[in-house]
Image (cartoon, helix red, strand yellow):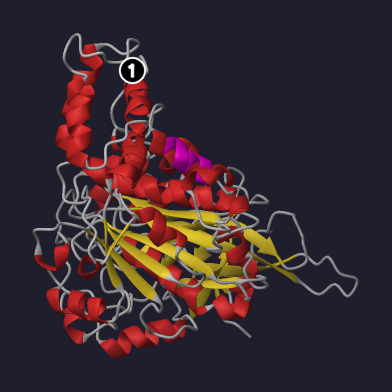
């Protein structure tokens, strides 16, 4: 028999409803928002056995019999903070909760005086709607105030399709939430591939320092110096989620090429780790030879407005040029910038001059190289993506590149995957289109690639396409950003799972999705600690769930 922790209270002005209830809390009991309780309720069975309604705590109030704050001031001898009132105020804690579920499908309001108890583990899972998931993916664990700890899951069918798809994570940078949680979920999926009898390719963009350039190396004690954790605690947290604490398997790395830099790359990867990857044939350098690069100029200039489509006309003309090197291409384009040069009569010289300047400045980076030597481990994005096999993780380092080149690489990856999925002959794949399986793409700083209110961007339109029909194509987007308000609405609207890490009060005040949250939830989001987040998932009955998750178990060297 579970001990009662309070009783439901219903008044003339504050009745219980089918969706809400309030109860007073027994003295000595401590509860907090997101705790889940059960309430004895009416029967819906012939044997008249009581049903139980389950509810999640939303807000806590403490009330007294005082008529107002001034009365409290007077009772302390008109403001004497050391005074002890002769008679203490009558008071109690009131808890307000949202009803989630009734185990007999009773939809009547809970009665006044009904007994309130802690929910047990089985009841919590049923209340949340996750007791019988077809493909459960560990998503962390929740802790109740009474000490109960429960692993929670999301449904793979709603995370990576076919029922729903896509994940978005928002939160302040540097609090070990966004990237860490995405990697935790992806590691969960990789560990469950055999159980689900389905393998997923994963493509990860590294956009910050060396964050994701060691996914195949195990976590070491030095990685935890800035935390209060040790390796045993981390392993225990993974075990709590019914997972093994281990790094990713079957990982390949792509680094930006530069012929004048050590190991022919501008990457900030740790030297010893990079050499290990090279020796094990896990690392290659990507570049854009002119023949492929000129087909990507639309992506290279995707951040530039083209109101009169003159930029697009120039790009079409450049694509047809026969230049064998980047130097030759720049020279040929420059030749169209002089009046009387015989340039395309439909394109003004001023437009050519604009394009010539853009090509000159934007193709100076080392990735725009024509050389091909075996020891330089050169490949192209198209080739590397087409060679990825189901179950493999491909990490693409774009951190050293300026934003417009980061957008180029991200867009190139997406275009290539779409071509593979749709069988686009333009890409010239060999005899048959490679099968790369279902692909999960993780992109941090999503607001850079799909900003809100941008209508002209090629990359934005491609990301919208993925979010709208990616689940049917086998393309799943895991996106993250500091400010959710800066990301395209259509992309966010198509995400079946949303995660909120610690967020600034200014961002919450902007509205968007935050305005639909309770005041308590908004307050919680602005103060979340490391390793905790708010989870919203398509199958959950609760609108938000506060979840903790294990520290990622891959090497994370400090800069």
Q: Quadrant of residue 532?
A: bottom left
Image: 10 above or below 376:
above
Q: How many marks?
A: 1
Of the pair 231 and 440, the residue shown nearer to us: 440
Magenta stretch contains residue 466: yes
Q: Which residue is mark 1?
A: 310
Q: Residues within 10 Å of mark 1 (few under 14, many from 20)?
A: some
Q: Residue at x 48, y 74 (%)?
A: 190
x and y percentages locating residue 407 in the rendered image: 31, 43
Q: Secondary structure at mark 1?
A: helix
Q: Residue at x 41, y 27 (%)?
A: 455
x and y percentages locating residue 431 in the rendered image: 57, 58
Give the dominant element type of the magenta stretch: helix, strand or loop.
helix
Q: Which residues are magenta?
A: 460-467
Which quadrant: the N terminus? bottom right
Magenta stretch contains residue 213: no
Image: 510 above or below 418:
above
Image: 54 above or below 410:
below
Q: Is any part of residue 62 visible from this angle? A: no
| 506 relative position to 455: left or right | left
Direction right: furthest residue: 46
Of the pair 169 and 555, the residue shown nearer to us: 555
| 37 relative position to 132: left or right | left
Q: Quadrant of residue 404?
A: top left
Q: Is any part of residue 453 visible from this angle? A: yes
x and y percentages locating residue 531 in the rendered image: 32, 69
| 261 relative position to 379: left or right | left
Q: Residue at x 36, y 32 (%)?
A: 319
Q: Residue at x 88, y 75 (%)?
A: 47
Of the pair 268 and 108, the residue shown nearer to us: 268
x and y percentages locating residue 547 in the rendered image: 43, 67
């Amino acid at each position: 028999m579970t001990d009662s922790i309070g009783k439901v209270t219903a008044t003339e002005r504050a009745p219980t409803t089918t969706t809400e209830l309030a109860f007073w809390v027994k003295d000595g009991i401590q509860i907090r928002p997101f705790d889940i309780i059960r309430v004895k309720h009416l029967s819906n069975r012939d044997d008249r056995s009581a049903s139980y309604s389950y509810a999640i705590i939303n807000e806590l109030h403490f009330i007294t019999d005082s008529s107002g704050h001034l009365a409290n001031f007077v009772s302390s001898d008109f403001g004497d903070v050391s005074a002890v009132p002769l008679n203490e105020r009558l008071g109690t804690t009131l808890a307000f909760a949202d009803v989630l579920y009734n185990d007999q499908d009773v939809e009547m309001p809970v009665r006044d005086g009904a007994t309130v108890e802690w929910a047990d583990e089985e009841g919590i899972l049923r209340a949340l709607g996750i007791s019988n998931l077809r493909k459960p993916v560990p998503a962390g664990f929740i802790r109740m105030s009474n000490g109960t700890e429960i692993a929670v899951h999301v449904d793979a069918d709603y995370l990576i399709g076919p029922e729903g798809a896509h994940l978005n994570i928002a939160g302040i940078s540097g609090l070990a939430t966004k990237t860490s949680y995405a990697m935790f979920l992806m590691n969960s999926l990789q560990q469950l591939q055999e159980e689900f009898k389905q393998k997923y390719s994963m493509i990860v963009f590294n956009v910050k320092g060396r964050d994701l350039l060691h996914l195949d190396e195990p976590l070491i004690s030095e990685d935890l110096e800035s935390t209060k954790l040790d390796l045993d605690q981390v392993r225990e947290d993974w075990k709590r989620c019914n997972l093994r604490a281990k790094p990713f398997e079957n990982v390949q790395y792509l680094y930006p090429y530069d012929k004048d830099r050590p190991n022919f790359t501008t990457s900030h990867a740790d030297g010893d780790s990079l050499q290990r990857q090279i020796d094990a044939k896990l690392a290659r350098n990507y570049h854009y030879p002119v023949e492929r690069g000129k087909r990507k100029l639309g992506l290279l200039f995707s951040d530039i407005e083209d109101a009169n489509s003159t930029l697009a006309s120039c790009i079409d003309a450049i694509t047809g040029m026969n230049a064998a090197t980047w130097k030759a291409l720049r020279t040929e384009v420059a030749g169209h910038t002089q009046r009387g040069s015989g340039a395309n009569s439909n394109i003004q010289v001023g437009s050519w001059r604009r394009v010539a300047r853009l090509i000159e400045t934007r193709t100076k980076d080392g990735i725009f190289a024509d050389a091909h030597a075996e020891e330089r481990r050169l490949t192209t994005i198209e080739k590397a993506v087409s060679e990825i096999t189901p179950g493999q993780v491909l990490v693409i380092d774009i951190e050293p590149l300026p934003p417009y080149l980061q957008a180029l690489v991200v867009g190139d990856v997406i275009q290539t995957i779409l071509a593979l999925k749709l069988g686009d002959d333009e890409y010239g794949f060999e005899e048959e289109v490679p099968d790369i399986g279902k692909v999960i793409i993780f992109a941090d700083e999503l607001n850079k690639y799909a900003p809100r209110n941008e209508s002209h961007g090629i990359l934005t339109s491609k990301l919208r396409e993925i979010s709208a029909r990616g689940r049917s194509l086998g393309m799943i987007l895991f996106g993250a950003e500091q400010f959710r308000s800066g990301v395209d609405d259509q992309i966010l609207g198509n995400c079946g799972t949303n995660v909120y890490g610690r967020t600034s009060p200014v961002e919450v005040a902007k509205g968007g999705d935050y305005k639909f949250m309770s005041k308590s939830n908004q307050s919680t989001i602005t103060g979340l600690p490391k390793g905790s987040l708010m989870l919203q998932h398509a199958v959950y009955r609760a609108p938000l769930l506060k979840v903790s998750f294990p520290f990622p178990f891959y090497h994370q060297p400090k800069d």
